[in-house]
Image (cartoon, rainbow, N blue to C red):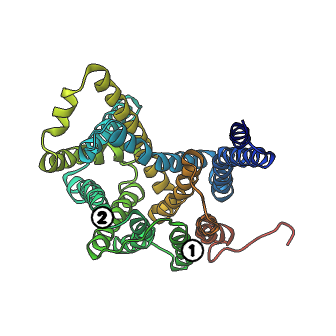
Amino acid sequence: SELQQQRQQQQQPSLLDVIANVSDGAVAYARNLTMFYAFPTFAALVVGVVILTYGDRGIATVCVILCYIAALSSIKLTVKWVFVHHNYSFAKFVTATHFTFGALLSYGFLRFRQKEFPIPTLKEFWLMIFPVSLAIAISVSAGNMALVHSSAAFTEIIGSTSCLFTALMVVLLGMPFQTSLLLPMLIVIFGAVVSTAGEIHFSLLGLLLCCIANAFRSLKVAMQQKLMTGETKDKFDPVALLFWSSVPSIFVMLAASAFSEGAEPYRQLAALEAGKRWSLVRAILVTCVNATILNLTQLFVNKDLGAVGSQLVAQAKSVLTILGSVAILGEIVSRMELFGFTLVLLGVYLYSWMDRKPQQKQDVEPPRGHVSWTPGR
């Protein structure tokens, strides 16, 4: 009987155990509550910074920038859902569907609007539009290959320097660039490097592939800016450029898919049951909508802010991506990462402010030879 009483006493939790369990439960509840409110709180912070930075450009520009950041932050999640949840890891084929969806949507809009359908000359197509499509394919392929040879953290660090590559491309294409803007660019790069979390695995081949991806991504946005703001700006608005750059991109990505993936994407899709097949099609369709919003808003942002400005705005997506992992996956953000996020937002704001100063000065100062006159004098 004494042995049974001892066993019962051991089985009954003590007061300290009860207090510890309640305390652990309260801490877990507080942590979950904090994670629940973390993402909308910092998302609201990003929205506030965007409004403060670009509010004077109009509500339309602010909305486009916010849609661009949101699409950029969610594209990896939607595509990864197709790759992992549906076990359909054919990146090039899925990318080809993105361009096909974007081409069809932009073609329908161009046909129904009350304007003449823009048709590029052979020179414009082969020397400007086709290189943009080729640059898209090369940058995407090089970026994916870099992930094989290097860690994701290392590719994020090298990818944050894309604004420097873009500034170089802008200068090489004969477009103006203010050297004073290098300071906020370096602040954004430093903030992106500081906020990068994960093991940094260096690889010389990975570094080369990251630089190739940066170079061709920068070439793409610089040539897009030249098409939309140069001599052809009346012909190619963002919707028209989306259509004409998507058409060759479809064939380039389908050719790349056929070379590396073969007929397996079609075989696997046909082998699925009807319910699973339609579930996969719906998931791919979601990525197509996401990618089209991303590509279209990127062109609008590029036209309004310039190639370098659009690349800096893109760095703000890292804030939402990391904080989204906090809210959804329960990951912990360090103080160093928060410091990096702050630097990214500060650098983007400084770039926008310094980019507007020469324009404001030019608007305020009277032209040379102007003589002011006041009645009565």
Left or right for 162, reference 367:
left
User: Disc number at residue 187?
Assistant: 1
Crowd class of label 1 (few under 14; some 14 to 19; many from 20; radius 10 Å): many
Give the residue at mark 2: 146
Q: Nearer the viewer, mark 1 or mark 2?
A: 2
Please provide percent x and percent y for residue 270. 19, 27
Please provide percent x and percent y for residue 279. 35, 26
Q: In the picture shown, does residue 271 fall above or below 9?
A: above
Q: Quadrant of residue 98?
A: top left
Please provide percent x and percent y for residue 356. 61, 66
Q: In the picture shown, does residue 333 fall above or below 174?
A: above
Q: Quadrant of residue 170?
A: bottom left
Q: Residue at image x 54%, y 47%?
A: 329
Q: Residue at image x 36%, y 28%?
A: 282
Crowd class of label 2 (few under 14; some 14 to 19; many from 20; radius 10 Å): many
Please say whether residue 115 is visible from this viewpoint: yes
User: Disc number at residue 296?
Assistant: none
Secondary structure at badge 1 equals helix
State the count of labels: 2
Q: In the picture shown, does residue 14 fall above or below 165?
A: above
Mark 1 vs mark 2: which is more N-terminal?
Answer: 2
Q: CA distance from mark 1 to mark 2?
A: 25 Å
Q: Residue at image x 51%, y 76%?
A: 178
Left or right for 306, reference 239:
right
Decide which of 202, 255 is in the foreground and name it: 202
State which quarter of the image contains the N terminus: top right
Decide which of 118, 79 is in the foreground and name it: 79
Amino acid of disc 1: Ile
